[in-house]
Amino acid sequence: MTSIVAFLIPMILFAILFNLPILVVILKRKYLTIPGIVVSSGLGMFFFIVQPFFWLVLIIFFFSSTLLSKMRIKDKSNVVLDFEKGSTTRDAMQVIANGLVPLIFVCGYAIFEVLPNLLASNDVTHNPSNAFFIGVFTAFAVHNSDTWATEIGILSKRSPRLITNLTKIVAPGTSGGVTIDGFLASLLGATLISIVYSLATLLLSSSHLLSFEFIIIIVSMVLGGFLGSIIDSFEGATIQGIYYCNYCNKETESHPHHPRCGKETKHHRGYMQINNDFVNLSSAFLVSSMVFLIGLLLN
Ligand SMILES: [Zn+2]
């Protein structure tokens, strides 16, 4: 018990020290709504205490996605108004949709790696090839890949095509619409997360770096992130609830009102129960569970 307290006190202090300046930036720039800030601060503190690299990957995902969504906002504002929330300020539900799957794996890592370590040896040695550790990074690889694909895809000069019927050209921002630029962005987004994973391996367990297992993990992570964003687009084209604004003659994710004009929207396709947050969560869960199993097999 004393070993747990001795571990927790400095970790909590460091977690506060590292999270505080970030909180100030988020508040100042209004990147999140107040409930969004509460949920993300909780996640940030917990991730840091379990393993600071989980916190680092969360921060990199959050800031890269936020900055991309603010990038050339004028070009995008037209399209953003058709998205579900109609704004680039993320709310608590979006934080949960992107944080829940990583959180499940962080909890698994805390219970099955950190805690037994503390109880047995009064010390924590971290293990990046632990399947839960891999699960955390893969979940972020999917979320990062998907966000990058969306944010960069809607800036694409090429017209998006529907993922379920590539001969059909759709309006930018249409759920299920894909572009080559979006695919490349998706691969880059997942690659960035795998670089952070490599850094974690280098610093925590350098003998694993460039081992056979390590290479399998990196490849699974990048391809998994990419696959996750494909699943996301596929769900967007098939099961996600999509609405139609008769006033603007446009498809939208928003219901009951269209942020662009404030008029009511009507159900157009998909299931009304399935929104964008569910789509994000389910694709991350599916892919990171698969890569988690690969991690188990490698151990
Ligand atoms: Zn409208």
Image: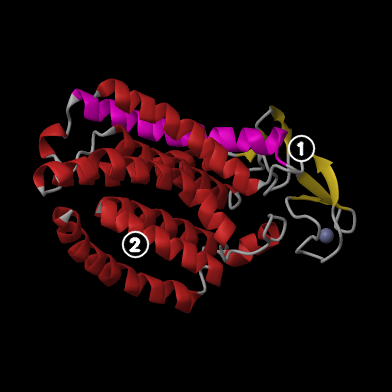
Q: Quadrant of residue 182?
A: top right
Is 273 on the left or on the right of 99, as rendered? right
Q: Where residue 99 appears, x then y in whole percent?
A: 46, 51
Badge nearest the viewer, 1 or 2: 2
Q: Which residues are magenta?
A: 212-240
Residue drawn 58% across and 65% down? 73
Q: Which residue is mark 2?
A: 45
Residue furthest to the top: 297
Q: How many marks?
A: 2
Residue type beneath disc 2: Met
Q: Is residue 84 above or below residue 184?
A: below
Q: Main secondary structure of the magenta part?
A: helix
Q: Where residue 111 appears, x then y in whole percent?
A: 30, 42
Q: Residues within 10 Å of mark 1 (few under 14, many from 20)?
A: some
Displayed-image quarter of ligand 1 = bottom right
Q: Is residue 195 among the parts visible in the rendering?
A: no
Q: Quadrant of residue 78?
A: bottom right
The residue carrying mark 1 has its beta carbon less than 8 Å from ligand 1:
no
Q: Is residue 226 above or below residue 244?
A: above
Mark 1 vs 2, N-terminal side: 2
Q: Is residue 214 magenta?
A: yes
Is 21 on the left or on the right of 246, as rendered? left
Q: Is residue 281 among the parts visible in the rendering?
A: yes
